[in-house]
Image (tube, coloured by chain):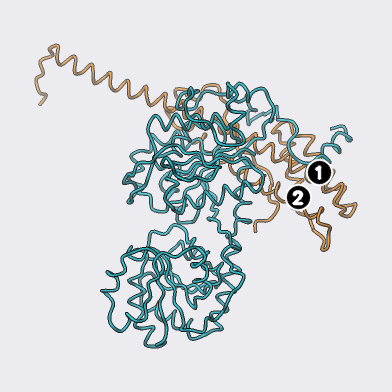
Chain colours: A cyan, B orange
Amino acid sequence: MRIGIVCPYSFDVPGGVQLHIRDLAEWLLRRGHVVSVLAPADEGTELPDYVVSAGGAVPVRFNGSVARLSFGPIVANRVDAWLDDWDFDVLHLHEPAAPSLSLLALWAAEVPVVATFHSSQSRVGTMRAAQPLLQPGLDKISARIAVSAAAHTTMASGFGGTTLVIPNGVYVDRFAPADLPPEPGGRPRIVFLGRFDEPRKGLPVLLAALPLVLAQVPDAELLVAGPGDVAEVRAGLSDQVVDSVRFLGVVSEEDKIRLLAQANAYVAPNTGGESFGIILVEAMSAGAPVVASALDAFSAVIGDSGAGAIFPVGDHRALAAAIVRLLESPQEQELLRRAGQARARRYDWATVGARIEAVYDSVAVERATDGPLRETVSPGGAGGSARGGRAPSAARTVFGAANGHASRRPPMPVPTQPGLRQPGSSSGRVARTVRRWLGR
Amino acid sequence: MTPDIEWGVQEWVILGSIVLAALLALGWYLSYTAVRLDRLHHRVIGTAAALDAQLVRRAEAALEVAYIAGIDPASAALMAASAGAALDQAETWSQDRLDAESQLSEVLRATHAPEPGEPVEVGELLERMRGTGERVKLARRFHNEAVQEARAVRGQRLVRFLHLAGSAKVPLPITFDDDWPAAT
């Protein structure tokens, strides 16, 4: 199948959506599909060869944070050219309501569209003002996917329509280290990962809980990994705890995995703004016993599987109690470790990717691969040569108006009484032989 | 207390432009809705075609399993018969076809029992058949969503009154028993 994926956010900056798209594209490529990803990226950025750049992105304040978006007439032309060159069977747009590439692609799309909504915090008010402008595009979406129940709720209240919830994927096996030294033979380790000077990540809650933990487990230490201003946080610490906190700065992926694998407790004290607890899944995959705040996104990941301890959001006493219980009982740690690793399987790409693939199949109509139609669609032969690698640059005529109305597909059967069907759907030879044999 | 307005040229121009603006707005809204309806109808057609393709694939997969998966002959005969019946009807959305598809779902529910220790190839076949069942469920769901959205717009009073939907037929949801395999 020929699959086009559109990422609205700049590929130069790491982010949840970008990582998800990268993993998804790589999984689909391994499954043998033809995949191209269109994303904003500044000139000179190293991009994987399945990514086509739509040009540089502009930082814009949108939806409560600064997002690097891409828009404007030149970009719109590039989107059209990309669609023409690749001639996809299905188009998968991410965050289609963000005023960026996905929206442009949605407008120009003439093939079935699958859309994934990631955000759980889009300000429905601001989007409502743009609703009449967005509606014609949203009407074209055949299948809507939300990454979590929280994202689902936002969208349901904002844009209507029912949705499948398919979580983000993790390559679980990459996070399970082969040589797992269970006890480094040191102090009980509490691990915190993330941008720690951002209050919503919840480090202050954890620091408030720390004295209570140290009262029970005096030799416990807290390891904080991630970017942020160390001096500022350290200045706010009391003498009692300052010796028990170590800041590791930004760590590599391998170090992160090792850190998680050797943790006696991984704490996610976030206070809000999380749409999906990908980090919890990573921690579980690596075998860290998880203690998480009761955000919807986190509760959904942990579920009722007992794969982690949950405490009320912002409640440092409850957090301290949960950590102490965990640190004092190796059996409890082992229990959470096992349950977490089992739970993480559900988020493995093997599971998640298959579900997304099923959605593609159920909206896309198999087309004849060698029909004359394709040639008339991309004149000049550029389409053919572009198929294996990158699409050529955007210097080409734009076909069809921006509303994507120029129909290039053959007339399809009316749902009330469809007649024609594309012959030769892809099921195996045997079925066809049997059918021929039976005279069908 | 009606204010006295001297109906000079200026007043007529103002009134005229207000009326013109209102007409333009109405016209824009009507064409917007008509285009929207057209788009929704296109989507309905697309989702129906996708569902059709998935149904055919499911029946073909069932035929394949019946003939080469080595399940017991009674199950195989039952599966092949109902898959064949479904394929026979595959050209329309008639009630007969929907009945045939429901019956196939029923048969699959009843017969599908993967034996332990089956060869890899058979496992793959069964897996593929199960995949087609899931896709049928998804496709029918997406189709009925599209139908529901199109019908919601068609139901608006102005749309009905002005026949904005034109000659497009009222799309119908496709209903049959697709409950196989069970959700995990």
**Crowding at label 1, few (<14), some or many (≥20) Cα neighbours within 10 Å?**
many
Q: Chain of mark 2?
A: B
B91 relative to A287 in the view: left or right: right
| Residue B34 x/y as whole percent | 46, 25
Q: Tag 2 or tag 1, which sits nearer the N-term?
A: 1
Mark carried by residue B106? 2
> Mark 2: which amino acid?
Glu
Do labels 1 and 2 touch, CB within 8 Å?
yes
CA distance for labels 1 and 2? 10 Å
**Crowding at label 2, few (<14), some or many (≥20) Cα neighbours within 10 Å?**
some
Q: Which residue is mark 1?
A: B82
| Residue A61 x/y as whole percent | 31, 46
> Mark 1: which amino acid?
Ser
In terms of secondary structure, where does tag 2 sit?
helix
| Residue B84 x/y as whole percent | 82, 39
The residue shown at (42%, 53%) is A120
